[in-house]
Image (cartoon, helix red, strand yellow):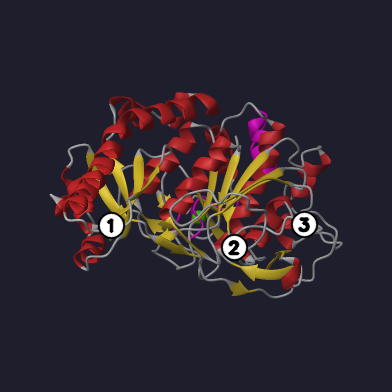
Amino acid sequence: MIRDKCEARLLRRLEENLQTTVVVKLKKTPEQVRMLSMEPARLSMSTQAAMNSLKKEAMNSQGEIREFIDKEYRSFLGSLRALSMSPQREKPLVKPLWLVNAIGVRGTPELIAELAKRPDVEEIVENQVFSLPRRFKGEAQGETEMTWGLRRLGVEDLWALGYKGEGIKVGHLDTGVDADHPDLKGKVAGWAEFDANGFEVPGSIPHDTDTHGTHTAGTIIGGATSGIAIGVAPEATLYSGMVLNGGSGTLLQVIAGMEWALAQGVDVLSMSLGGDGITSVFDEAVRNLAAANVFQSYAIGNSGPMVTSAPGNVPEAYSVGAVDINDRIASFSGGGIVFRKQDRIQPDGCAPGVDILSAFPRANGSYARISGTSMATPHVSGVVALLKQAYPHRSAVEIESALNATALDLGRRGDDSRYGLGLIQPKLALALLNGGSSVG
Ligand SMILES: [Ca+2]
């Protein structure tokens, strides 16, 4: 039984007889099956309704297994008492999730084996660690007034129409953020830090445990105090969750951050993170965020052609590849076909991601120029914030369709595994959302 439900890597760990943190996925309830069988566009659920439904389903279906874990530990303590011994193992740690119907459990191999036997358990996976994708030092591009990325996307045309992101909430899960950076000050409206087991750290205040989060935040909401505008949506507000402590984070940490972002009511979620290959727990999380009408822009990864990273490669996310100032795809930019049903070619599209100037924590020099699909992703997130401000009643699916229909085809003709549908063209997407012509 345990072999059917656990990955090989996790089984090896359990054989080493170590306390392990795992994510236990429960079988879907009939309501969850119904939600998953519908196209996100047709669910037309409000964010609040989607959240309430997810929480209710999780609460109703997780009671028994949580009781089982408690009982198992109580009986362990009881047997020790009978032998007059003191406990030599900790109480199992349980982190209930609701964005996916799963619980995080830190426990002994025996407990995990018992959980695998339960009929309500679908799968048990390791609390996988994600590390930041490789980053590449960038070269100067001789910009004035704004970064080449903002210029290439023509964001000034949208700004001129009054769309700078006002009233739009962007979720940002990363290494943290230097919220007092002069280009970010006053724009970080929400902050939370999560530990490796997915619990929120009480009393945490905004800080960057690396430099990556401040850089990606700068591309979304950064201002122009240096004389060069760095952010696509400088009037949007950022909800920043620290899920990569010093550059790496766990599956539970990231899922907890995704739950938190949804609870903040974000319109867009930007994640410049991921792990190469497929992580099944992300499928349900991404799907449910889509059902709650959140636009998800996620990096496709920096491992080059034929490799994609999760959660960017989940069909309901908008996965982003990186191009340079000459519209050439970066050699590191990922893509390919993920072999699952309803899969399409990855990435979905691309955005400026090479030699990108943005904010760095003040302690690290305030500005830096780096390259990666991590840098392309926040460009898309910022653009979606502008489009959402212009057309607040357009759904995440409609906005994605507009980006897809107006993308500038690059590379091989048509959709391809390097550029996806091509470079996003915000002004044309705006016109399409308005019902205007997409030809420009
Ligand atoms: Ca193409």
Which of the two discs, 3 and 1, sits closer to the camera?
1
Drawn side of residue 265 relative to residue 29, left or right: right
Closer to the N terminus: mark 2 or mark 1?
A: 1
Structural distance between the alpha carbons of marks 3 and 1: 47 Å
Residue 52 visible, this orientation:
yes
Residue stretch in magenta? 413-439
Give neighbour class at mark 2: few <14, some 14-19, many 20+ (Cα, 10 Å).
many
Q: Where is residue 404 in the image (x, y as percent from the top left)?
A: 54, 43
Q: Is residue 41 above or below residue 310?
A: above
Which of these two is toward me, 262 or 200? 200
Q: Is residue 180 above or below residue 344?
A: below
Q: Which amino acid does label 1 sit on?
A: Pro
Q: In which quarter of the image is residue 61?
A: top left
Q: Which residue is drawn at 51% across and 50% down?
A: 421
Q: Where is residue 1 in the image (x, y as percent from the top left)?
A: 12, 49
Which residue is under mark 1? 87
Residue 265 lies in the magenta-colored region: no
Which of the two discs, 2 and 1, sits closer to the camera?
1
Q: Residue at x 36, y 56 (%)?
A: 127
Which residue is under mark 2? 323
Which residue is under mark 3? 180
Q: Residue at x 43, y 30 (%)?
A: 55
Residue at the outermost left position: 1
Q: Is residue 431 above or below residue 349?
A: above
Q: In this view, does 98 lie above or below 346?
A: above
Q: What residue type is labelled 3?
A: Asp
Q: What element carries label 1?
A: loop
Q: What residue type is labelled 2?
A: Val
